[in-house]
Protein backbone atom coordinates (compact mmCIF):
# COMPACT_ATOMS: atom_id res chain seq x y z
CA UNK A 1 0.00 0.00 0.00
CA UNK A 2 1.42 3.37 -0.99
CA UNK A 3 1.78 6.26 1.46
CA UNK A 4 -1.02 8.09 -0.34
CA UNK A 5 -3.34 5.07 0.00
CA UNK A 6 -2.48 4.79 3.69
CA UNK A 7 -3.23 8.48 4.22
CA UNK A 8 -6.60 8.11 2.50
CA UNK A 9 -7.45 5.01 4.50
CA UNK A 10 -6.51 6.65 7.83
CA UNK A 11 -8.55 9.75 6.93
CA UNK A 12 -11.53 7.56 6.03
CA UNK A 13 -11.36 5.57 9.29
CA UNK A 14 -11.02 8.78 11.33
CA UNK A 15 -14.07 10.30 9.60
CA UNK A 16 -16.12 7.15 10.24
CA UNK A 17 -15.16 7.16 13.93
CA UNK A 18 -15.97 10.84 14.40
CA UNK A 19 -19.32 10.40 12.62
CA UNK A 20 -20.07 7.33 14.75
CA UNK A 21 -19.25 9.26 17.96
CA UNK A 22 -21.72 11.92 16.85
CA UNK A 23 -24.36 9.23 16.17
CA UNK A 24 -23.93 7.80 19.69
CA UNK A 25 -24.23 11.24 21.28
CA UNK A 26 -27.35 12.15 19.27
CA UNK A 27 -29.18 8.85 19.58
CA UNK A 28 -28.03 7.42 22.90
CA UNK A 29 -26.41 4.11 23.77
CA UNK A 30 -28.02 0.72 23.16
CA UNK A 31 -26.79 -2.49 24.73
CA UNK A 32 -27.41 -5.97 23.38
CA UNK A 33 -28.67 -4.78 20.00
CA UNK A 34 -27.40 -2.72 17.06
CA UNK A 35 -30.27 -0.27 17.46
CA UNK A 36 -33.18 0.21 19.85
CA UNK A 37 -35.63 3.08 20.38
CA UNK A 38 -33.21 4.29 23.07
CA UNK A 39 -30.05 4.37 20.96
CA UNK A 40 -27.42 2.44 19.05
CA UNK A 41 -24.49 0.34 20.17
CA UNK A 42 -20.82 0.94 19.34
CA UNK A 43 -21.00 -1.27 16.25
CA UNK A 44 -24.42 0.07 15.21
CA UNK A 45 -23.09 3.64 15.30
CA UNK A 46 -20.22 2.64 13.01
CA UNK A 47 -22.66 0.95 10.63
CA UNK A 48 -24.82 4.09 10.53
CA UNK A 49 -21.72 6.20 9.86
CA UNK A 50 -21.08 3.86 6.93
CA UNK A 51 -24.60 4.42 5.58
CA UNK A 52 -26.51 1.41 6.93
CA UNK A 53 -30.10 2.29 7.80
CA UNK A 54 -32.03 1.21 10.90
CA UNK A 55 -34.27 -1.18 8.95
CA UNK A 56 -31.27 -3.13 7.64
CA UNK A 57 -29.80 -3.33 11.14
CA UNK A 58 -33.06 -4.56 12.67
CA UNK A 59 -33.28 -7.27 10.04
CA UNK A 60 -29.52 -7.86 10.28
CA UNK A 61 -29.29 -7.53 6.51
CA UNK A 62 -26.09 -5.56 6.29
CA UNK A 63 -24.10 -5.48 3.05
CA UNK A 64 -20.86 -7.45 3.39
CA UNK A 65 -18.75 -4.47 2.30
CA UNK A 66 -20.16 -2.29 5.11
CA UNK A 67 -19.85 -5.11 7.63
CA UNK A 68 -16.21 -5.73 6.71
CA UNK A 69 -15.38 -2.03 6.91
CA UNK A 70 -17.14 -1.75 10.29
CA UNK A 71 -15.12 -4.70 11.60
CA UNK A 72 -11.90 -3.00 10.44
CA UNK A 73 -12.87 0.20 12.27
CA UNK A 74 -13.79 -1.81 15.41
CA UNK A 75 -10.40 -3.50 15.24
CA UNK A 76 -8.60 -0.15 15.40
CA UNK A 77 -10.62 0.95 18.43
CA UNK A 78 -10.08 -2.36 20.23
CA UNK A 79 -6.33 -2.13 19.59
CA UNK A 80 -6.13 1.49 20.75
CA UNK A 81 -8.01 0.56 23.91
CA UNK A 82 -5.96 -2.62 24.30
CA UNK A 83 -9.14 -4.71 24.41
CA UNK A 84 -8.27 -7.25 21.74
CA UNK A 85 -7.71 -10.57 23.43
CA UNK A 86 -6.72 -13.98 22.20
CA UNK A 87 -9.67 -16.09 21.22
CA UNK A 88 -11.99 -13.09 20.83
CA UNK A 89 -12.28 -10.91 17.74
CA UNK A 90 -11.88 -7.16 18.02
CA UNK A 91 -15.56 -6.77 17.18
CA UNK A 92 -16.60 -9.20 19.92
CA UNK A 93 -14.29 -7.40 22.38
CA UNK A 94 -15.90 -4.06 21.56
CA UNK A 95 -19.44 -5.48 21.79
CA UNK A 96 -18.66 -6.94 25.21
CA UNK A 97 -17.13 -3.63 26.32
CA UNK A 98 -20.13 -1.64 24.98
CA UNK A 99 -22.62 -3.89 26.77
CA UNK A 100 -21.00 -3.59 30.21
CA UNK A 101 -23.49 -2.23 32.75
CA UNK A 102 -21.30 0.74 33.65
CA UNK A 103 -20.68 1.83 30.03
CA UNK A 104 -22.02 5.28 29.11
CA UNK A 105 -22.63 7.25 25.94
CA UNK A 106 -19.60 9.39 26.76
CA UNK A 107 -17.36 6.33 27.28
CA UNK A 108 -18.21 4.99 23.83
CA UNK A 109 -18.04 8.33 22.01
CA UNK A 110 -14.74 9.18 23.72
CA UNK A 111 -13.23 5.81 22.72
CA UNK A 112 -14.15 6.49 19.09
CA UNK A 113 -12.77 10.03 19.20
CA UNK A 114 -9.60 8.95 21.01
CA UNK A 115 -8.90 6.33 18.38
CA UNK A 116 -9.56 8.84 15.59
CA UNK A 117 -7.15 11.36 17.12
CA UNK A 118 -4.42 8.79 17.67
CA UNK A 119 -4.69 6.58 14.58
CA UNK A 120 -1.61 6.64 12.41
CA UNK A 121 -0.57 5.16 9.10
CA UNK A 122 1.83 2.83 10.95
CA UNK A 123 -1.16 0.93 12.33
CA UNK A 124 -2.47 -0.14 8.93
Image: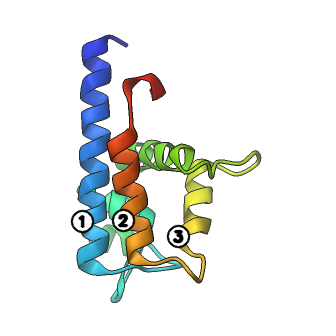
Give residue 103's position: percent from left, percent from top: 52, 77
Q: Residue at x 35, y 58 (%)?
A: 46
Q: Nearer the viewer, residue 107 or 2?
A: 107
User: Disc 2 to disc 1, how far (Cα)?
Assistant: 7 Å
Give the mark nearer the N terminus: 3 vs 1.
Answer: 1
Give residue 15's position: percent from left, percent from top: 23, 46
The answer to whether the residue labelled 3 contacts the one labelled 1, judged by CB atoms less than 8 Å apart, is no
Q: Residue at x 28, y 74 (%)?
A: 25
Density class for disc 1 (Cα within 10 Å; few <14, some 14-19, many ≥20) is some
Q: Is residue 76 left or right of residue 4?
A: right
Helix, strand, or loop for circle 2?
helix
Q: Is residue 26 left or right of residue 93?
A: left
Helix, strand, or loop for circle 3?
helix
- Whether residue 60 is visible to the viewer of this picture, yes or no, is no
Give residue 123's position: percent from left, percent from top: 47, 28
Q: Residue at x 61, y 58 (%)?
A: 92
Q: Quadrant of the C terminus?
A: top left
**Residue tagged 1:** 22
Density class for disc 3 (Cα within 10 Å; few <14, some 14-19, many ≥20) is many
Helix, strand, or loop for circle 1?
helix
**Residue tagged 2:** 109
The answer to whether the residue labelled 2 contacts the one labelled 1, judged by CB atoms less than 8 Å apart, is yes
Q: Residue furthest top?
A: 2
Numbered circles on residues, count: 3
**Residue tagged 3:** 98
Density class for disc 2 (Cα within 10 Å; few <14, some 14-19, many ≥20) is many
Amino acid sequence: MSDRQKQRRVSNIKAILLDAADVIRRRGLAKGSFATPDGVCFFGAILIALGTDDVAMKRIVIPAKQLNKAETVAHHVACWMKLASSGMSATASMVKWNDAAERTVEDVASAMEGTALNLSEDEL
